[in-house]
Amino acid sequence: MGHANPAAILRSQSAAIGKALGSMLAANHQLEHSASGRSLMELSSRLRDPAVNDAELAALFKQGIRELKDTMTAHHEAGHVLAYLYLTPRQRLQLDDIMFTGRTTDGDVQARVAYTWISEPCWPDPAQRDEVIRELACVMAGKFAEPELSGGVQLEGSDRDDQVMATELLGFLPEVERHDAIQDARRFLEYTILPSQLHSLASYFYGRWIDGETVVTFDEVQAFLAATPQGPV
């Protein structure tokens, strides 16, 4: 029985990452045609280039994984922001700055979307089914907003904290209602998160981030979205 060829495995994995990057860019034309997007497209091409030597390919592979996670996180956080913007009442809560807080020891980016209660009752009121479902939709919005990757590439763990929060929210509802609540939350997202706004905001977050800016204020988000197609009223 033959042994696996490490160089061949690296080329196969690198090609898959390059294809996944390319598919993400193809799905988000705003990012694809930005300066940062053109750099990502070049990286995608290099990852699939058979002329690249093994040493360079190993470095490109690590870069490709990092950039794929970064762009995925930008979409994830953009989904949360849009859902909170359109599904929650401004008189009850205030969205905080979007924080890109660094990287884990594995190189995974850390980001945070949070809000502050500004009036009673606290959001969401566990006794109000509609509020629980709207908050559930906001929690689910990150994973909902992530583009599907080609080449069988999957990034795990992007919604681990969201899953914990979703479980807590569903605990406010009778067990027989939880399946319908998830479906209702997904319908909220399908009618709320417009692809044009999602792609624009994800591209905006990614561009700010790679420029070294770790904080995007909510006022800046609103000003940016004012120049993009109108969201739900």
Image (tube, helix red, strand yellow):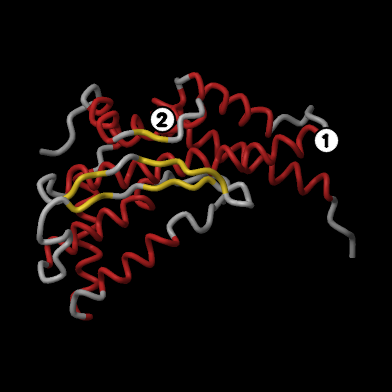
Question: Residue 9, image x and y in percent?
Answer: 77, 49
Residue beneath label 2, please? 203
Question: Left of 58 or right of it: where is 41?
Answer: left
Secondary structure state at the residue bearing disc 2? helix
Q: Residue at x 32, y 44 (%)?
A: 79
Question: Left of 95 or right of it: where is 153?
Answer: right
Residue sitting farthest toward the bottom: 175
Q: Amino acid at mark 2?
A: Ser
Residue 146 versus residue 202: which sits nearer the camera?
202
Q: Which quadrant of the rendered structure holds the C terminus?
A: top left
Residue 79 versus residue 51: which sits nearer the camera?
79
Question: Left of 45 or right of it: where is 53?
Answer: right
- Disc 2 to disc 1, C-alpha distance: 31 Å
Secondary structure state at the residue bearing disc 1? helix
Vertical arrangement, residue 219 with respect to residue 118, above or below: above
Residue beneath label 1, please? 55
Vertical arrangement, residue 40 with respect to residue 12, above or below: above
Neighbor class of circle 1 (other Cα within 10 Å; few <14, some 14-19, many 20+) is few
Q: Residue at x 31, y 47 (%)?
A: 80
Q: Which quadrant of the rendered structure holds the N terminus?
A: bottom right
Q: Residue at x 29, y 43 (%)?
A: 96
Vertical arrangement, residue 229 with respect to residue 3, above or below: above
Question: Residue 15, image x and y in percent?
Answer: 67, 39
Vertical arrangement, residue 182 with respect to residue 33, above or below: below
Q: Amino acid at mark 1?
A: Ala
